Image: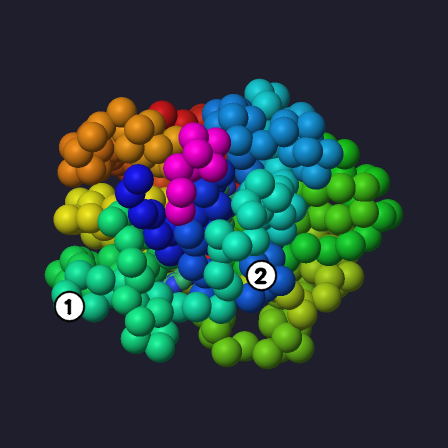
């Protein structure tokens, strides 16, 4: 039996572990953070993501921890409805809940937290104390700015995308009650600034704000107090729902995301190392396809590892199956980003802010 090391316990690494577990393939996961620090905010999942998740976890668990969205409503910044579209099985769930659900099937002795792995010149994964990891296959799921990927593909060009995102969760029963299960997104008419609202549960709301990073400069070092002040000022004359959420929120756990993309995708594997999820292909948040793509990577890689004796062939088939679809999402993400930067009256008729194949 081949020994498999998985690096990173985000959605990609954990979903990979679940697929391996399902097929009785042995593995060990290494995660840099503490278990309790793997929280984060939330995700939109299209129908396909739910189907893949349902193969590895009990769908009832999933449905108890998130919400199906009914309708996408596009608003002007002042709150005038501009367009509406019924949503077909789009689901919203907090990252914390999804991480917890995915961790339930993994025995604690198969996961080591607080260990940052490196990749040395001899092509070995190493623990922080310099010990080599004894594995035949290394599955790398260490995120969009993957250090291991940069170590292997030294010439890659990772660039900042012209969009920053602030994501936050607010606990407020009164506001949650008035949102229903709609995906509400408010847009500044001149483009480059939006505010999205999604209800996670009866008392919690996920909100995010997308900024044109050339027009709105927010530093990563910005303090909680100054971030709140900046947001309150920026959104003060937006719809009362937006400004009340901005005002009522605690910014303790708000996160500013600087978004990166690869100028060109690297191969998804080299020798005995294979990349999945954001580590293989950073996708900009506009696509809402990061989680679903990670799940499909894990499913596809497991399938080929089972079917092929030869690991190299399994990796090759995995890449051939996954790369074309990822390229579509990258192109859609760039189109959605370009549209976001334009004034609203120049947007296309396709209003849904999600990438579909
Ligand atoms: C603002 C924002 C909004 C998004 N919204 C959506 C959405 O609505 N829907 C959607 O589907 N996707 C969304 N995404 C994308 C989604 O978050 C990711 O695609 C998805 O979570 C898969 O991530 P991952 O597991 O590949 O990487 P990550 O979540 O980055 O996980 C990588 C893990 O590896 C660990 N790690 C890193 N280096 C090492 C190391 N050397 N050794 C050990 N461990 C290491 C990290 O601590 C981390 O836990 C969004 C992303 C952003 C930034």
Query: Residue furthest toward the front?
Result: 1
> Quadrant of residue 124 in the image?
bottom left
Nearest to the observer: residue 159 or residue 25: 25
User: Position of 96 compared to 339: left or right?
Assistant: right
Q: Determine whether the residue tagged by mark 2 lies in a helix, strand or loop.
A: helix
Q: Residue furthest right?
A: 174
Q: Is residue 222 above or below residue 92?
A: below
Front-most of residues 87 and 320: 320
Looking at the picture, tell me which residue is in the foreground, 348 or 329: 329
Q: CA distance from mark 1 to mark 2?
A: 29 Å
Instruction: Judge the density around disc 2: few (<14), some (14-19), many (≥20) Cα neighbours within 10 Å.
Output: some
From the image, tell me which residue sits under label 2: 35
Q: Is residue 203 visible?
A: yes
**In this rendering, does residue 98 appear at all?**
no
Q: Which residue is mark 1?
A: 121
Q: Residue at x 42, y 52 (%)?
A: 28
Part of the protein shown in magenta: 20-27
Q: Quadrant of the C terminus?
A: top left
Q: Quadrant of the N terminus?
A: top left
Q: Earlier in the sequence, mark 1 or mark 2?
A: 2
Q: Is residue 22 above or below residue 145?
A: above
Residue 60 in percent (x, y) is at 69, 28
Rendered location of residue 315, percent (x, y) = 21, 37
């Amino acid at each position: 039996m081949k020994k498999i090391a998985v690096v990173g316990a985000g959605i990609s690494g954990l979903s990979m572990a679940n697929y391996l577990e399902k097929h009785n393939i042995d593995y060990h996961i290494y995660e840099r953070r503490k278990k309790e620090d793997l929280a984060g905010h939330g995700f939109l999942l299209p129908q396909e993501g739910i189907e893949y998740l349902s193969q590895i976890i009990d769908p009832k668990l999933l449905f108890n921890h998130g919400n199906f969205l009914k309708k996408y409503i596009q608003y002007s910044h002042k709150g005038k409805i501009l367009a509406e579209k019924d949503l077909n099985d789009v689901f919203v769930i907090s990252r914390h809940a999804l991480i917890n659900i995915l961790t339930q099937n993994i025995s604690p002795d198969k996961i080591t937290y607080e260990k940052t792995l490196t990749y040395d010149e001899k092509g070995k994964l190493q623990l922080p104390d310099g010990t080599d990891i004894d594995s035949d296959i290394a599955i790398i799921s260490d995120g969009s700015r993957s250090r291991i990927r940069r170590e292997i593909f030294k010439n890659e060009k990772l660039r900042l995308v012209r969009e920053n995102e602030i994501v936050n969760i607010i606990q407020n029963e009164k506001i949650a009650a008035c949102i229903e299960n709609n995906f509400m997104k408010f847009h500044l008419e001149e483009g480059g600034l939006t505010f999205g609202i999604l209800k996670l549960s009866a008392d919690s709301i996920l909100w995010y704000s997308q900024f044109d990073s050339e027009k709105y400069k927010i530093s990563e070092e910005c303090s909680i107090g100054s971030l709140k002040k900046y947001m309150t000022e920026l959104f003060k004359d937006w719809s009362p729902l937006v400004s009340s959420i901005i005002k009522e929120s605690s910014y303790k756990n708000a996160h500013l995301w600087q978004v990166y993309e690869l100028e060109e995708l690297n191969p998804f594997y080299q020798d005995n190392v294979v990349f999945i999820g954001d580590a293989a292909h950073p996708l900009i948040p506009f696509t809402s396809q990061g989680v679903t793509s990670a799940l499909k990577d894990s499913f596809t890689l497991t399938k080929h590892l089972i079917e092929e004796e030869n690991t190299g062939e399994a990796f090759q088939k995995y890449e051939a199956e996954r790369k074309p679809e990822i390229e579509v999402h990258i192109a859609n993400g760039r189109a959605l980003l370009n549209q976001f930067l334009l004034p609203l009256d120049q947007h296309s008729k396709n209003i849904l802010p999600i990438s579909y194949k």
